Amino acid sequence: MKDWMSRLGIILVLAGVGYMFITMLPSLTAGYRFMTYNYFTQMTFLEAGAENYVTGIYLEYRLFDSLFEAAILFVVAAGILFMSRKDEERL
Amino acid sequence: MIVRILLVILIILAILVVKEKNNLHLIMYFSIFSFTAASVYFLNYALDIALAEVAVGCAFVPLIYLITVSKQNVFTVLIDKEFLHGEDYQDNDLYKKLVFLLEDFCSYYTLELKVVTKRVRYYPTVQGIFRPGNIDLIVSLDEENNHLVITGNKSNIMIPRLDKMTRKYKNIDLIEVDEYEGLDE
Amino acid sequence: MNENALLKIISRMIFPFVLLFGLYIIFNGDLSPGGGFQGGVVMASSYFLLYFINDINMLSVKQILRIEKVLFLLLVLFSFAGVLTHGIPFRGMFFSEILIFKQINLMVLNIIIGIKVTLGIVGIISIFLEEGEL
């Protein structure tokens, strides 16, 4: 009996938190919605030389994230190669 | 308005992905899900993400799933105990035909044949055996008509190919059965 | 006719067009939606249209990883050259700020990332298909 009571309690708490979050969400982000958007759309062509501001962001303002993402791809390929070898003497 | 309809379709597709049992149908539902998500991204003016989502979710990920589902090299056959009773079961005509058929089939598709004679304890019915024991075929003997009855899983890729091969033999029947997903004990 | 003939003929006909489309997405990364990552995945899918249906294997996995090492090193060097010199070669060394140097910088980065993503995805699925036989 205590099993379904605890589950019901957890579900009610989560539903209450979710309801509060959804109803308060528009007012939490009202004043900050356009600050970074205005900056990036006005200054990207002057500083990065790209008309597509997504390219300007991931190749000029956040270049190191793209560097590590390329490193992730390389490590994944090498890792899969290591895991799938079928030798007689396993490492 | 269109965006809301597409979001509801997304939820329906997600439930379908969870409840479906055939493996190949799952891959198609996942691909359609990814395509619908890409159109939701497109209608909200996020163009780069839509391009990446289509390229990854409709070409790269279903390819990996497809290769994994269809690369099962070991073909496991379970032969019922009643078929093997007695000492002279190897002289049985049906048994020789069965062995010839299985070896021909496995060497043609480069599979490895493995014969098992013990049943798994938990699932006494026919349908419940395929998943926990990782068994591909079950062979049993129908003694009245001197028939061999072979049952296989419907979502296995090898079973329709085996079906083509067993049509030449009159005494061997192939039955396809749905997969049974039971409770974990 | 054989059942597979339709797939083989169409895959061989479509292969150069998909490759060209992928290159178009990479090269016009700073004008229209696209860029290095997206074009790389499209080019990888064009290679697999040929490999998965026919049995034409053009690159082996060892060569792919060797080229990828060199490309990753090149990417690191190129991006650090911009950081360590305060971005001066890419903003015009002797002149005032000129647009063409910035566009060359963006295009070279896009090409390197595009080829790297292509080779990475081709390598991953080649290992899946061959199952570890090198």
Image (spheres, helix red, strand yellow):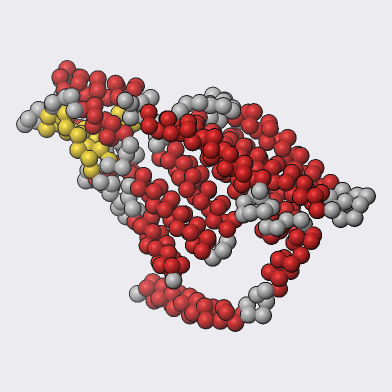
Q: Which residue lies furthest to the right in this view?
A: C94
State the residue at coordinates (56%, 63%): B45
The vertical placement of C129 against A51, above or below, is above
Of residue B185 and residue B180, the one placed in the foreground of this image is: B180
Residue A4 visible? The answer is yes
Of residue B55 and residue B115, the one placed in the foreground of this image is: B55
Image location of residue C37, percent across then percent down: 62, 48
Report how many numbered discs are placed on residues in the image.
0
Location of the C terminus of chain C by quadrant is top right
Location of the N terminus of chain C by quadrant is top left
State the residue at coordinates (67%, 53%): C31
Q: Which residue lies furthest to the left in this view?
A: B144
The vertical placement of B5 against C31, above or below, is below
**Left or right: B45 with respect to A7?**
right
State the residue at coordinates (19%, 34%): B174
The vertical placement of B110 against B28, above or below, is above
State the residue at coordinates (59%, 56%): B48
Residue B74 visible? The answer is no
Of residue C5 and residue B98, the one placed in the foreground of this image is: C5
Of residue C96 and residue B63, the one placed in the foreground of this image is: C96
Image location of residue A64, percent across then percent down: 74, 52
**Left or right: B60 with respect to B9?**
right
Q: Quadrant of residue B100?
A: top left
Image location of residue B39, percent across then percent down: 48, 59
**Left or right: A25 with respect to C101?**
left
Q: Quadrant of residue C116?
A: top right
Image location of residue B182, percent across then percent down: 30, 52
